[in-house]
Image (cartoon, rainbow, N blue to C red):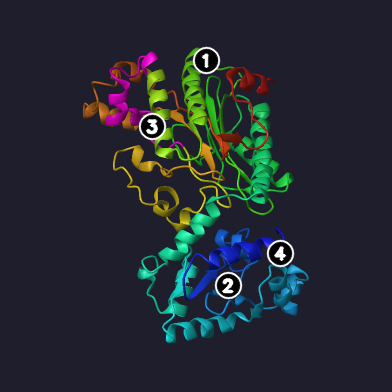
Amino acid sequence: MFSRETYVRRREVLRNSVKSGILLFLGNEESPMNYPANQYTFRQDSSFLYYWGLDTPGLAAVIDLENGTQTVFGDDPTVADIVWTGPQPLLRSRADMVGANRALPLASLEETIGEAIHGSRPVHYLPPYRAENVLKIEKLCGIHPSFTQKYASVAFTKAVVAQRSIKAPEEIGEIEKAVTITYEMQTYAMKMTRPGMAEREIAGAIHGVALAHGGELAFPIIFSVHGETLHNHYHGNVMQNGNIIVNDCGAESGLHYAGDLTRTFPVNGKFTARQRDVYRVVLDAQQKALEAIKPGVPHRDIHLLACKALSSGLRQLGLLKGNIDEAVAAGAHAMFFQCGLGHMMGLDVHDMEDLGEQHVGYEEMQRSPQFGLSYLRLAKPLRAGFVITVEPGLYFIPELMDQWKAQRKFEQFIDYEVLETYRDFGGIRIEDDVLVTETGYRLLGKPVPKTIAEVEAACMR
């Protein structure tokens, strides 16, 4: 946990951002794998962690905006609980640790919410993403599960997004811890990967690296010779000479802040000439995007800058032709770069996306319906204190090639004959985690090998 004062200060900022009523925070519960006593590793709700810091299941909290009370709801451990989990602090003690002025049994939450509703006071809650919290809202507020998203508080959501978006120094420190663990995962994979090994051997080992360094996974590991599949969590392929691996992995720090780094490297330690050419295009696009980062610049503009850099490189390789600005405006580059340049990162690897991408990434801006650009998660102007990922890539997806070629789509920009020779290429992604500063950007964590020479040296057997 951070200091008691940190959580008191965060809640005070929030109190001044929403006008009236009560703010309801629902913590997460344990989730069984297959029977109640066999549970997945517990993960607390990130907004609950941000404002209350209590990393145990079975909790809720309320801020009363009129009378100023701040209440943690939960139950003290019984002797039966202690038998299985060991001694746990009492609820009152946990509430004191984070500066809450009241601690009440969980059963009294229903009465507290009921009194507010009967007094015609607004009950603000955040969009729920777990089924059990949807059902809790139904029980507490009388809102049918099909309407819980619709009636989530926009004012509460916007206030949380605004506050959590700007990372305080203690948060940046935690993110750097997570990124540094992720560095260890990435460099271990480069050293240990060899032809003839199964992907799962390395994926399992780097999960172990995260655990050994006091972290956990921020998201399921992507480690695949089929890097053209953007979120590929299958690890059953046997790696062969000539394959390249996309390793997209990230650890959480002990306080659940995320890291998220991607590197692409050759299975046998040496890129082929073609792989080097495509890799250089991606690396150049990432550097151009990094250099454009500063407060006030819309992230969508930086994304499009990266798209033009990728497209210029692809034209040099003979894959694209014609006017690059026109090709990007039309969306022809999305044959190769189907996703967005990056996303916010913090307590969630895709920070706050449970609160809605419109609020987190767009605010009043409108999302483009264009294929590729529509997947951009962050478009709004950057601010100092944002932590974002920068992750351009090039992906050669045979099914997309076949579909667009059959439709004769963007023939004025795409050379389909040349593209056919890349059918089995796979994909390349390079990703770093970045703090937006007052004057530009700063890479977070220990630098992972990134140039071709650095990567090949890291892969030396």
Residue 156 location, x and y as percent?
A: 47, 65
**Camera sees residue 220:** yes
**Camera sees residue 261:** no
| Distance (Cα) linking label 4 and label 3 | 43 Å
| Distance (Cα) linking label 1 and label 2 | 55 Å
Amino acid at circle 4:
Arg
Looking at the image, tell me whether mark 2 or mark 4 is earlier in sequence order.
Answer: 4
The reply to whether the magenta stretch includes residue 56 is: no
Find numbered disc 3 in the image and state the secondary structure of the residue it sits on. Answer: helix
- Residue drawn at x 46%, y 40% as measured from the top left: 296
In contact (CB < 8 Å): disc 2 and disc 4:
no
| Distance (Cα) linking label 2 and label 4 | 18 Å
Looking at the image, tell me whether mark 1 or mark 2 is earlier in sequence order.
Answer: 2
Amino acid at circle 2:
Ala
Q: Residues within 10 Å of mark 1 (few under 14, many from 20)?
A: few
Task: Give the foreground label among 3 and 2.
Answer: 3
In contact (CB < 8 Å): disc 4 and disc 3:
no
Name the residue carrying label 1: 272
Name the residue carrying label 2: 60
Looking at the image, tell me whether mark 3 or mark 2 is earlier in sequence order.
Answer: 2
Residue 204 location, x and y as percent?
A: 64, 41
Find numbered disc 2 in the image and state the secondary structure of the residue it sits on. Answer: strand
Name the residue carrying label 3: 304
Task: Give the foreground label among 1 and 2.
Answer: 2
Amino acid at circle 1:
Thr
Looking at the image, tell me whether mark 1 or mark 4 is earlier in sequence order.
Answer: 4
In contact (CB < 8 Å): disc 3 and disc 1:
no
In the rendered image, which quarter contains the C terminus? top right
Q: Where does the magenta region start and end?
A: 315-341
In the figure, 414 relative to 183: above or below? above
